[in-house]
Image (cartoon, helix red, strand yellow):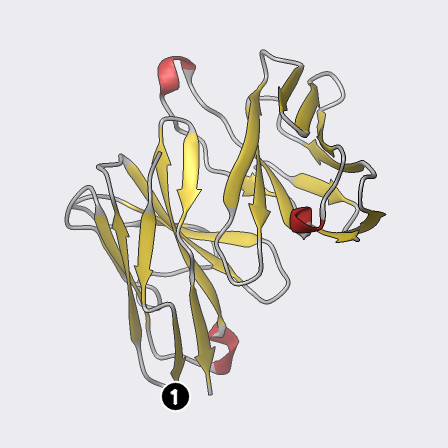
Amino acid sequence: SAVISQKPSRDICQRGTSLTIQCQVDSQVTMMFWYRQQPGQSLTLIATANQGSEATYESGFVIDKFPISRPNLTFSTLTVSNMSPEDSSIYLCSAKVGDTQYFGPGTRLTVL
Amino acid sequence: GENVEQHPSTLSVQEGDSAVIKCTYSDSASNYFPWYKQELGKGPQLIIDIRSNVGEKKDQRIAVTLNKTAKHFSLHITETQPEDSAVYFCAASMVGAGGTSYGKLTFGQGTILTVHP
């Protein structure tokens, strides 16, 4: 299994600013992901965080808006850039161990 | 790509009753189907999963059934308790033999389960 922690757990930000979310896994994992969950909605995959190389983004998400780093097998960051109120959402880090995918507690972001 | 439909969107039961949530998927290549429970303010937690080489799997009060031909799978919760109240998500992906994972999880829309004492 994997235990995933995220920082911050929540934040309130001003329009036009950026926020970096950190994700730490308690064991080495091969695959890490970032998801967005808008209020009352399902989970949408933003990107797969690749160790030592550029993340793989899903349709509708771009690196300039959501830059991702993954310097090693246990840590990743997601930045939400130039934020607008539409970016208010829960951002979830996820890691895969074998076939099983685990999720962090999420970061609740509110943009004013 | 894969598309997962989940029903119902809300489900209200009395404590002790059974609850059933159903999902259908579109990609016949999908072979791994996990279910997640998400409580308010928390991340999704895996509660049970099933591979396509198995038709049913049980874990205490929770069971999942899979019909590959019809491409649908269901979550069954028996003897429901108020602490079962949460949002439940089904998902589908492809995994390889020997544990190699190459598929992305595609989630259903979620079911809000409320268990009344």
Q: Quadrant of residue B48?
A: top right
Q: Report x, y in % for residue B86.
A: 65, 52
Q: Residue at x 58, y 45 (%)?
A: B37
User: Chain under label 1?
Assistant: A
In this rendering, is residue A3 above or below B67?
below
Residue lying farthest to the front in this orientation: B117
Could you tell me residue B103's position as x and y percent? Answer: 45, 31
Q: Say whether residue A14 is left or right of residue B109.
A: left
Location of residue A111 in the rendering, given as x and y in whole percent from the top left corner: 45, 82
The image quadrant where one finds the N terminus of chain B is top right
Residue at image coords 36%, 86%: A16
Above/below status of B45 relative to A37: above
Task: State whether residue A80 appears in this view.
Answer: yes
Q: Foreground residue, A101 or A50?
A: A101
Corner quadrant of residue A29? top left
Tell me if mark 1 has few (under 14), some (14-19) or many (20+) residues whose alpha carbon lies within 10 angstroms of its own.
some
Q: Please, what secondary structure does the residue beneath circle 1 have?
A: loop
Relative horizontal placement of residue A13, taking residue B61 as reference (left or right): left
Decide if residue B30 is in sight here.
no
Question: A43 and A28: which one is in front?
Answer: A28
Type of amino acid at the residue the image marks with label 1: Gln
> Quarter-wise, where is residue A50 in the image?
top left
Front residue of A32 and A106: A106
Task: Write down the residue under mark 1.
Answer: A14
Residue in the picture at 49% in, 26% down: B94
Residue at 48%, 65% (x, y): give it: A90
Q: Is residue B18 above or below residue B11?
A: above
Q: How many marks overall?
A: 1
Q: Camera-side residue: A20 or B17?
A: B17
